C-alpha cells in the first residue's frame, strides 16, 4: 500500500490546531483571573507619603508574589487625591494570599489614617491591548 501525504497541507492543519488550542487555553486562563479596581480617596495633605507606601507595596508584590500579575495606579488630573488602581491576580486564591503578606499588611497599617474613602470594585476583563515591549 502506497500512501501519499501532502506535507504542506498536514503542517497547515497542525499549525491551525496549535493556534486554536493556544487561544482556547489563553481564554480559559483569563477566565480565572481576578480583576479589581480600587478607588481610593487620600487625604491631600498626606498624598506624597501615601504614594510612597503604595509604590513600595506594589513593587514588592510584583517582585515576590507570582499570583500578582498587574498593577496600574493612576491619579485624577483634576484631583490627584482620587486614585484608582487596576489590580490583576492569577485567581482569587492569589488575592487571598496577597492580603496576608507582610508587605501588604505593612501598607495597610501605614496608610490607614491617610485613606479617607476606599471602594473595591470587582470587574471582568473583556479585552486588553498593549504595544510590544511595554
Image (cartoon, rainbow, N blue to C red):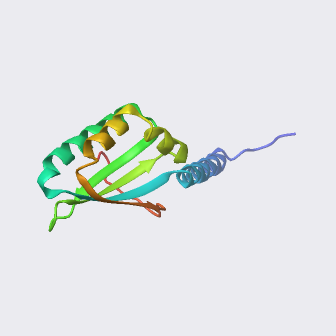
Residue 45 visible? The answer is yes
Residue 62 visible? The answer is no
| Left or right: 99 in relation to 18 | left
| Left or right: 27 in relation to 108 | right
Q: In this view, does 17 lie above or below 101?
A: below
Point out residue 9 in the picture as x, y percentages from the top left corner: 64, 51
Instruction: Tell me what residue is drawn at x 60 percent, y 53 percent.
Output: 24
Q: Residue furthest front?
A: 113
Instruction: Tell me what residue is drawn at x 18 percent, y 56 percent.
Output: 43
Q: In this view, does 92 lie above or below 126?
A: above
| Circle count | 0
In the rendered image, which quarter is residue 84 located in? bottom left
Point out residue 35 in the picture as x, y percentages from the top left corner: 45, 55
Decide which of 48, 127 is in the foreground and name it: 48
In the rendered image, which quarter is residue 65 located in? top left
Decide which of 27, 95 is in the foreground and name it: 95
Q: Which residue lies furthest to the right in this view?
A: 1
Decide which of 22, 110 is in the foreground and name it: 110
Q: Which residue lies furthest to the bottom in this view?
A: 78
Instruction: Tell me what residue is drawn at x 37 percent, y 47 percent.
Output: 70
Instruction: Tell me what residue is drawn at x 44 percent, y 62 percent.
Output: 127
Give the position of the N terminus as an image quadrant.
top right
Decide which of 89, 46 is in the foreground and name it: 46
Point out residue 130 in the picture as x, y percentages from the top left corner: 33, 55
Point out residue 120 in the picture as x, y percentages from the top left corner: 40, 59
Amino acid at each position: 500500500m502506497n500512501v501519499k501525504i501532502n506535507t504542506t497541507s498536514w503542517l497547515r492543519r497542525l499549525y491551525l490546531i496549535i493556534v486554536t488550542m493556544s487561544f482556547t487555553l489563553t481564554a480559559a486562563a483569563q477566565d480565572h483571573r481576578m480583576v479589581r479596581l480600587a478607588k481610593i480617596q487620600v487625604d491631600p495633605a498626606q498624598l506624597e507619603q501615601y504614594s510612597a507606601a503604595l509604590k513600595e507595596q506594589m513593587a514588592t508584590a510584583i517582585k515576590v508574589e507570582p499570583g500578582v500579575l498587574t498593577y496600574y495606579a493612576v491619579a485624577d488630573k483634576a484631583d490627584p487625591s482620587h486614585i484608582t488602581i487596576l489590580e490583576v491576580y492569577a485567581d482569587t486564591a492569589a488575592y487571598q494570599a496577597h492580603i496576608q503578606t507582610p508587605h501588604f499588611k505593612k501598607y495597610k497599617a501605614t496608610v490607614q489614617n491617610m485613606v479617607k474613602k476606599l471602594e473595591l470594585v470587582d470587574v471582568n476583563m473583556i479585552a486588553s491591548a498593549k504595544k510590544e515591549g511595554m
